[in-house]
Image (cartoon, helix red, strand yellow):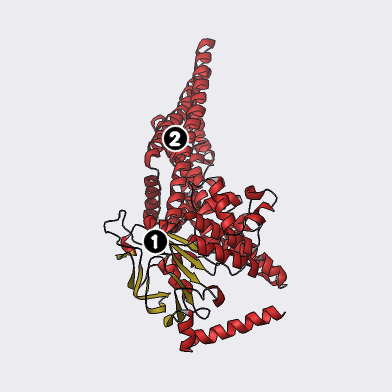
Amino acid sequence: MKKDQNGSFVWLLRQSGERKGKFVTSVILAAISMLCGIVPYYFIALIVKDLLAGRTDKSAYIINCAVILALWLGHSLFHALSTANSHLATFHTLAVIRKRALDKLAKMPLGNVISQPSGALKSTIVERIDSIETTLAHILPEFTTGIGAPIIILIYAFVINWKLGLAALITVPLGVICYMLMMLGYEENYSRTVRATKALNAVTTEYIGGIEVIKVFGKAQSSYEKFAAVAKESAASFVDWMRKCNVYMTFAMCIMPATMLSVLPIGGIMAIHGTISTADFITIIILTIGLIEPLLGIMSYSDDIAQMDTIVTEVRNIIDAPEMVRPEKLTKTIMNGDIVLDNIHFGYNDKEIIHGISMTVHKGEFIALVGPSGSGKSTVARLIASLWDVSGGNISFGGVDIRDIPLDDYNDKIAYVSQDNYLFDLSVRENIRLGNQSATDQDVEDAARKCGCHDFIMSLENGYDTLVGSSGGHLSGGERQRISIARAMLKNAEIIILDEATAYTDPENEAVIQKSVAKLVEGRTLIVIAHRLSTVKNADRLYVIREGIIEEQGTHEELLAHDGLYSKMWAAHISAKDGEDNV
């Protein structure tokens, strides 16, 4: 455990980078503060000795009191400066860690990210990292004063009288025994609280995110019961642990600081027998009365240190997770804009779902991927977009394996719109502008007009400056999709992938979008995944995918003539469409 904790602390210091010097400065200032807090005891002892000696010269007392006051002011000042430096370094370190974690999420395969509960990731990156602040900001200065001050005081007490110095430590073994009893089962109890807290975060996120479905299907009671059960377990994990520790902790906190229980009787006997002077006896009383409290302060950090180690482990699991390996610079020449899938294989959790698919998408070509739900269409599109890496075969762009192209370079060439589109809690204008940060307001509005969403945007409360809410919650599903398409169009990428991008739009707006997309993708490669076959019947080539393989390919007319799966899907589509028209 100790080795792991030291490793975590060293790892945190490494993240501080250029601010590491502020941690060093914090320790130095804490040491000065500690000395300023200890030296007054020496002058207090001088005052006591002068009083016992019957000295009446007020100037000596005034000087000693002035020195004590100056030292205590210095103690407060240097402590504040030490804390300020440690906090500045800590906040910088936490910011660096958060940025590294978020940067890693962007480089990890998409499957590795979405396989983890979003509540757990959010808890780690936001709350859990934030909880390190108290420990990291205080551990260096507090340990400096918490250990240094008692050692110096004890040495001074031993110099005056080693027997009384030793007597001041009699309560320590008893307190340590109580503390050790309190720590029994620590790993098990702490692990339970971590599991319970993670579960509570995950269920809370799920409950809030699914509140609409919960209400519509009348599952409020059962969903709340699930949330309540997890919340009770979270509370119980802490309450039960505290109940086990309370008695031992109370005895430890009461016994260890009670140095006077041994110093007073032993020192009194020694004073009566003349083996110690009254002045030295009083001095040792003054020195040892607060001897153990700083050590208790350090011991109180044991939970925080263990928590810090657990959190650092969680964060490092993210930061050190395998990522999609890409070069920093492009070293090969991209010959053209053709996309070639050569016998690709891919699977989730050791279960292969794409079985040796091969296809060629020429630059400027419009191709469509169709097939039954769950056949692997969207997975193929995501593999082309480099959101995952293939487990077998390869995908090339312009004759270069996409794994040999820097991720940012390849991302610049692709505009991807999925059916699960996402809008940020920004204005409509800024959500569209994410496709091209250098775009002017006029460029944004032009893209919106071409995608058929200018009119509905102008009908919003503040037009283009209307905030869309968290995840675009203030807009309908169709409106979110149209804004996402406008954002993709504004990117002006070479390859446009639409994964059921018109799934939530009504027929009228779908027709507008289809016309606008047709104009905007001229000279660009367009890959569309669609269930509504009428939207892609004019594709240059359709690939019919079923159970992870290409079952058919060709133009709309060729596939109908083949009388295979596509022909059956088309017949079903026309039948359903006729039924909608007759309603």
Q: Nearer the viewer, residue 449 or 569?
A: 449
Residue 89 higher or lower than 470, as above or below: above
Between circles 1 and 2, the one closer to the viewer is 1
The residue that mark 2 highlights is: 149
Badge 1 element: loop
Residue 145 higher or lower than 511, as above or below: above
Which amino acid is tagged 1? Answer: Ala
Disc nearer the start of the sequence (1/2): 2
**Mark 1 surroundings within 10 Å by alpha-carbon count, few (fewer than 14), some (14 through 19), many (20 or more):** some
Residue 511 image point, x, y percent: 60, 67
Quarter of the figure with residue 222: bottom right
Q: Nearer the viewer, residue 156 or 380?
A: 380
User: Which label number is shown at residue 321?
Assistant: 1
Q: Can see residue 545?
A: yes
Residue 350 higher or lower than 227, as above or below: below
Quadrant of the rendering where the C terminus is positioned: bottom right
User: Which label number is shown at residue 569?
Assistant: none
Which amino acid is tagged 2? Answer: Ala
Badge 2 element: helix
Q: Nearer the viewer, residue 227 or 358?
A: 358
Quadrant of the rendering where the N terminus is positioned: bottom left
**Whole-number angstrom distance, CA of label 1 to CA of label 2:** 42 Å
* Residue plotted at (65% across, 67% down): 508
Quarter of the figure with residue 422: bottom right
Residue 462 image point, x, y percent: 68, 48
Quarter of the figure with residue 19: top left
Residue 122 image point, x, y percent: 53, 57
Q: Nearer the viewer, residue 544 or 242?
A: 544
Q: Can see residue 280?
A: no
* Residue plotted at (70% across, 50% down): 461
**Mark 2 surroundings within 10 Å by alpha-carbon count, few (fewer than 14), some (14 through 19), many (20 or more):** many
Residue 433 image point, x, y percent: 53, 50
